[in-house]
Every structure is written in structure tokens, then in C-alpha cells.
Amino acid sequence: MLNNISIRKSSFNEDNSIKKVGLNDHKVKNFGPGNYQLTKKDIHYIVYGACFLASGGGGPLGLALLFMDKMLNDADVMHYVNPENLEAHKNIAFVAGLGSPDKIFEGFGQTVSLNAFMEMNNYLVQSGQEPLGYLIPVEMGAMNTLIPFIISAKKGISVINGDPCGRAAPEMSMNLFNIHKLPLNPVILTSDTDESGHYQKLIIQVKDADDAENQARQFAQSHNSTAGMACYPMRGVDLNCSILSDKNWAKFIQWTVGFAWNLGRDMVELKNYNKFLEFLESFPLTSYTLFEGIITDKEVREISGFNVGKIIVSNGIETFFIYYKNESLLAWNVTRKCYVAMGPDSINFLARKDAQPFSNSDINSDSKKNPKNIALGTEIGIIGLCADEKLKNTELVNLFLANIQETLAAFPEDHIPYPHKYIPLSDLMSNYNG
């Protein structure tokens, strides 16, 4: 073990992570006080847990909490469904919001996702199909895991307990739906509803996920830097993970919403950093406490329309750099000149004072707008989670490596070598302990 680096491994062997059913999975399948029904309090837990799992991305925690308070009422009831219980004939889509956090803090973007949902519904019905029966989160993240539940509250639609990323990712192509070539079209883009009750929409057939993301960004730029997106229409039979649909297990990561609920409940109710780490170890995944120290600085630059940056954390003896492109992609020990973690493994943050999770965009943000601003000088823990085996697909790993290289290129003065191959977190930790 390296001096001053607390490498804490979970109590489960990593081989268990590839099993479909593991110890304590009942916690993440059937969670919450109701029978597949959730209240605003449950969504609060999910937002916290999803923020932690997002590897620094997925939108600001403070923004998600403000958004939730504006869009959900205490009496709202939301519904979820487990992947093995999807009805074959019901239609599915994922609906997301994208845009500038600053604009959303100002009040824009509150209706974009609901508008996208309604337009996808209209498209399906006008095509002679059933309306949407399920939504699936785009990724784990405070905002994009929240959005389907806001629609559930308004429309009574169920949200699937799973997602195609297991974390948040910088680009739309970096998800298992894309890797498995699931049909993406049509892609529907929508603006906010204006004072007269109208909104703009665009229904397009795109070449691929990169084309969809580029067009969505262009659309958002013309509409107060926010947009709603609906895409990947499919049926329940395409994702059902019962024994009869065994092949669908590879297409997405099951039970992540329930996992987020469990983690978030522990964070919110106990607010205890050390107890949370103990709780995390009760789940069948491999996790490590990579570093503990104080945030000393944050540098932000822009490349190709993305925010890239570097979080600097120090304990007075050693220093860590966490490089991100919206999401954290690489952790580097400056003192020892070595990689600590890299995507698709996730690099997650917790405040040591109260176990609050946070995203890169919450760090040193505008405290007047963001109630969960994380100031420089905050003492934090950096927690590494080993990626699900499905995310170690060669195509997906290469996308992560390309994004890591692009991010490092924005900081040439650091002279960080580009990783030429993915080194799993467990291997990096073995070298630390060796």
C-alpha cells in the first residue's frame, strides 16, 4: 500500500461482478417503500445516488434538486419496472435534456424533456403504433436519471430500473445501445414551451449517435442553450431480461436505479462518510478509496464545444489530478507520476464532512445559484468503482481512450502521457499494493 493513499477494496471478488444475480441484488431490484411506486422522497434518494455513480458528470446535484423541487410535488407518485418484467408489446424510448447548466439555473429548460416525450408519443401513434409504455434513463447522473421520473409523475409512465451506461459519459455514442446497434431513429428535438404555449420541434433521421449529438447541440444553441431529446424507440421485447429474453442482458445495465436509491438513502439519512463506504462494500461490485484530500483548484477549458477540466486535490504530501470532459475520465497521481483510474471505470466524489456526492460542475460553482456548491478547500474522498464487464467492450473502451487523449491534449503543459491501452482499476490497485 502506498503511503498516504488509502486503497480500500470492497469485500466482493471482482469476478462476482459479471454474474447476473448476486448477493443483495434484491435491494436494487425491489427498492423503496411501495410496490414499484416511488414518492418525491425516493426520487431525492435516487438523485443523490445517481450523482455519486456518474463519475463527476450527469449534471450538477444542486441543479437537479432545484429542478426536482420545481417539477415534483410531495403528493406525486412515480412508477418503475424491473427489466425482467417488461411487457413485450409496450414501446420504450429514452428521453433526456441537454444544455447549459447556467441557463437551466436561470429557469430555462424546464419543459424541454416533457415536450420531447410528447412528440415521440405523437410520432408513434401517428405511425400506427402504441404510445410509449416505458422510459429508460440515458445514464446515471443527477439530472438525466431524474428526468424520466418527472415525466412519470406527469404522465403515469413507468421508468425502467436500468440504463445503458452505468455511469455518465461524455458523448452519446458511449452507451451500450449504440454498441449493440439498437435503432436510434427517429431523433426528436424540442425547445421549451413559450408564454403562448408553443414550442419548436425537429424530427430527424440521423446517420449515427455522433450525428444525433451534433444536431442536438446545434438545436440547443438556437433555443436558449437547452433542448429535449427523445430517441431509441423500441419495444419491451427488445430489453426484457426474463429467462426467455436472455440475450437482452448485454444491451444495458440492469437495476442501476435501485442501486442509486440505496446509495442515496444512506447518504441522505446518515450523512456519514465512513459509514457510507462500509455500506458501499455490501454490494457486489469492486470499489476503492483512491485518495483523500482537499480540493485546491479547478481549471476549465473548452474544446470542440465541450468543457474539459482538471480538479486538483492534495493532502499536503501528495497531489492528484482528475481530468474530465464533462465526466471524470482519468485520475493521475502527480507525486508518483502514475495513473490511478481511467474510464470506463468511474471516479466519484464525496464530501468527507457529510457524504454529499457532487459533480465536477458543482465544484467552485456560483453559490448564489447552486445550493450544493462545493467550495475550494473542501475535504473530499475520491472513490473508484470498477466498470461493469459490459462496458469493457473494445469499441467502448476505445471511445473512452479517445476522449482521455482529447482531454489531456487540452493541458499540454502537464506532460501527462496518453494511455495507449485501458488499464482496469483492479490492475492499477494491484500495482499499488504490490
Image: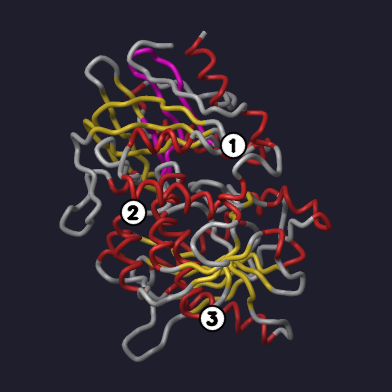
Cβ atoms under marks 3 and 1 closer than 8 Å: no
Q: Which residue is mark 1?
A: 284
* 241, 101: nearer the viewer: 241
Q: Main secondary structure of the magenta part?
A: strand
* 417, 346: nearer the viewer: 346
**What is the secondary structure assignment of the residue under circle 1?**
loop
Q: Which residue is mark 3?
A: 118
Q: Is residue 240 above or below residue 167?
A: below
What mark, if any, has residue 61 been given in the picture? Answer: 2
User: How many neighbours does mark 3 have within 10 angstroms: few (below 14), some (14-19), or many (20 or more)?
Assistant: some
As measured in the structure, the alpha-carbon distance from the residue carrying label 3 to the one carrying label 2 is 26 Å
**In this rendering, would 351 be left or right of 425?**
left
The residue drawn where x is 65% and y is 81% is 131
**In this rendering, would 74 be left or right of 167?**
left
**Residue type indicated by callout 2:** Leu
User: How many neighbours does mark 2 have within 10 angstroms: few (below 14), some (14-19), or many (20 or more)?
Assistant: many
- Mark sitting earlier along the chain (3/2): 2
Of circles 2 and 1, which is in front? 1
Cβ atoms under marks 2 and 1 closer than 8 Å: no
**Residue type indicated by callout 3:** Met
* 264, 220: nearer the viewer: 264
